[in-house]
Amino acid sequence: MTGPVPVGRGAGRVVVVGDVVTDVVAVLACAPATGSDTPARISFTGGGQAANTAAWLAHQRVPVTLVGAVGTDDTGRARVAELTGLGVDCAVTRHPDAPTGTVIVLAAAGERTMVTERGANLRLSAADVDAALAGAPDARHLHLSAYPLLDAASRGAGLRALAAARERGLTTSVDAASAVPLRRVGAAAFLGWVRDVDLLLANADEASVLADGADPVAQARALARVAHRVVVKRGGAGAVWADRAGTVVKVAARPVEVVDVTGAGDAFAAGLLAAWAGGAAPAVALERAGDLGAVAVATVGARPPG
């Protein structure tokens, strides 16, 4: 698949809230040699979970607004320009006293490790969210990357995003973002913040933080007592859907040569949202999500292929 597929046209506008960063992606030729040199292919690309998801939604021709924050530096201008070029409407605030976020991504053996400076993303505010929603009267769904919730400095913006969406009658989804920060804030606190969202997404590591046991079906069912619908993303092992109606759907991953897994979960989320918000059944939505995830892992960087 090389071009956008317009499956999401019935989804309406999606507002995505969260981080915008520059990714410095190093695709390692072998395991890193601690204290020495490791050959790698290194690229500088746009990143940030929310920005990536917005880009993949736009790739599917879903109207999308991104709510985020960058610095007034050259990288901030570049990140906004590239997102706008991809078709994303950017409600992105610029901060002169903070740099645009940067993430160093070490990708090897189907896994990635991230070293993160959130920078201006920590300045995202509840007022930014309210202004963006006021400027998107056609919005039907709000998707929150959990990174704003996982830092005290930006937590107010994340909480306001969910509250404002409910006030406006929008459906809501949250991507759990990252296992270590989740563990740091605590599962009980996080699940309290996201209680009764329409859709919660978590990868295998995040699901293990949020729910007991290792069985993804049991984890999804347990989390469906918090969110109305839950998807556990399992990478090459596929994905599981569970909801409060008792529906459980499992899909296998499409076999593909893995080049770089950076942003694969964000592409998966975009495919899922475009299909589900457009009225697709869970199995169809998971298949579409898996299709986009497969495209992402075959591509260096976190954004759709040009």
Image: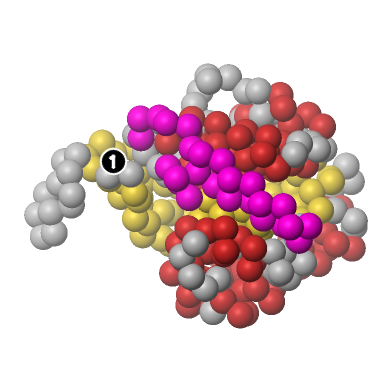
Q: In the rendered structure, does residue 133 fall within the stretch colored magenta?
A: no
Q: In the rendered structure, does residue 239 fall within the stretch colored magenta?
A: yes
Which residue occupies 75% across, 39% down? Answer: 281
Along the viewing direction, whichever of 1 and 57 lies nearer the viewer: 1
Residue extending farthest to the left is: 36
Along the viewing direction, whichever of 38 and 121 lies nearer the viewer: 38
Secondary element type, mark 1: strand
Count of marks, rendered view: 1
Task: Give the crowd class for mark 1: few <14, some 14-19, many >=20 residues within 10 Å.
Answer: many
Q: Quadrant of residue 300?
A: top left
Which residue occupies 44% across, 69% down? Answer: 180
Q: Position of residue 170 (x, y in %)?
A: 85, 53
Residue extending farthest to the top is: 2
User: Is residue 242 shown left or right of residue 21?
Assistant: right
Q: Quadrant of residue 272?
A: top right
User: Is residue 259 shown left or right of residue 271?
Assistant: left
Tell me where the magenta segment starts and ends, as one range.
234-258
Residue 138 visible in the snapshot: yes
Along the viewing direction, whichever of 138 and 205 lies nearer the viewer: 205
Along the viewing direction, whichever of 45 and 241 lies nearer the viewer: 241
Q: Position of residue 139 (x, y in %)?
A: 84, 45
Q: How is the image coloured?
A: secondary structure
Q: Which residue is mark 1?
A: 27
Residue type pointed to by label 1: Val
Vertical order, 17 against 264 (above or below): below
Q: Position of residue 298 (x, y in %)?
A: 41, 30
Vertical order, 143 against 85 (above or below): below
Q: Position of residue 134 (x, y in %)?
A: 86, 53
Vertical order, 6 against 243 (above or below): above
Residue 206 visible in the snapshot: no
Which residue occupies 72% across, 52% down? Answer: 247
